Image (tube, rainbow, N blue to C red):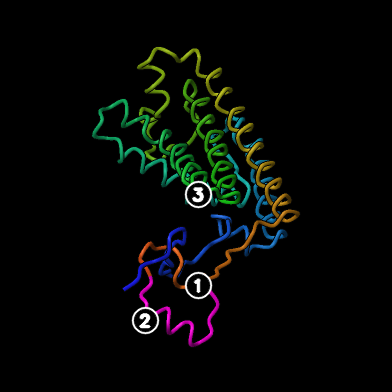
Amino acid sequence: MTGPSPGNKPLQARTPVAKLSSQPVDPLERFVPLGLKIALFLFCILMLYQALDVFIYLSPRPQLPAPLSFIRMFIFLPMHEGGHMLFFWLGRTMSILGGSFWQIMFPLLSFAIALRQHSTVVGPFALFWTGINMMDVSLYMRDAPHRILPLLGGHKSGHDWWNLFRTWDMMESAETIADLMYFGGVFVSGISIMAGIGFAVYYYSNPPPMKQKFYQDPKELTHEPISQSDLSTKATKGHEW
């Protein structure tokens, strides 16, 4: 039996390979039309406009406009109360702080996950709600020295930030800290809206590549030598190598 002649590399068996072009991780970039994305962030602008006025002025009977009132009652409040239960085992301070902490951290974690997935729709949207929740928490902080806001438990002694600022001996700084939290939330919300609209327009003008598949000849990438019988068969059928 003769081997391959010197200087000639043996033919090699090949296996099927699927090759993919780059594609966006976020499927929203491919399927949601530009108008729907813009509408989403226009809704965010409406929410920010409402929050600017509602979350800076104290009132014993705050009148929240819809739909912000619905979102605050059925989304923000459950997150806040869930934070108290989530952190109660870490001691009294964290049990009290956990409500406001989790109210901000939950959408922030959602933003971090979306950022890891390179989502340019969910990411800015989650970051927007992080900022709005910062503004909501700032109102609670601002109320600490006065305790005029209605509380879920009813009794003024259960005011989270009154207890926290009193424990930390920071009651005189409540207004300043509330301002920092409020304007920080305005900044985060505003940046997220601009980023969301900017990404929507950019990907509309520069659509990302779609997934593409093609298969190479099924004998290409392994190092297994092709048998003599396989060569004879191929030659008979007239296949080109």
Residue under circle 2?
229
Point out residue 108 in the picture as x, y percentages from the top left corner.
Answer: 48, 39
* Residue type indicated by callout 3: Gln
- The N terminus lies in quadrant: bottom left
232 to 9, vertically: above or below = below
Point out residue 39 in the picture as x, y percentages from the top left corner.
Answer: 69, 56
- Mark 1, secondary structure of its residue: loop
Mark earlier in primary sequence (2, 1): 1
Determine the image quadrant of residue 61: top right
Mark earlier in primary sequence (3, 1): 3
Question: Alpha carbon of mark 3 to alpha carbon of mark 1: how far?
Answer: 33 Å
Please give the range of residues in magenta.
Answer: 226-241
Closer to the camera in the image, 86 or 15: 15
Residue under circle 1?
217
Closer to the camera in the image, 126 or 87: 126
**Crowding near the residue tagged with mark 3, few <14, some 14–19, many ≥20 C-alpha atoms within 10 Å:** some
- Mark 3, secondary structure of its residue: loop
Left or right of residue 179, residue 156 in this image: left
Closer to the camera in the image, 231 or 30: 231
**Crowding near the residue tagged with mark 2, few <14, some 14–19, many ≥20 C-alpha atoms within 10 Å:** few
Mark earlier in primary sequence (3, 2): 3
**Residue 238 part of the magenta-drawn span:** yes
Q: Which mark is residue 117?
A: 3
Left or right of residue 157, residue 213 in this image: right
Q: Of discs 3 and 1, which sits in the foreground?
A: 1
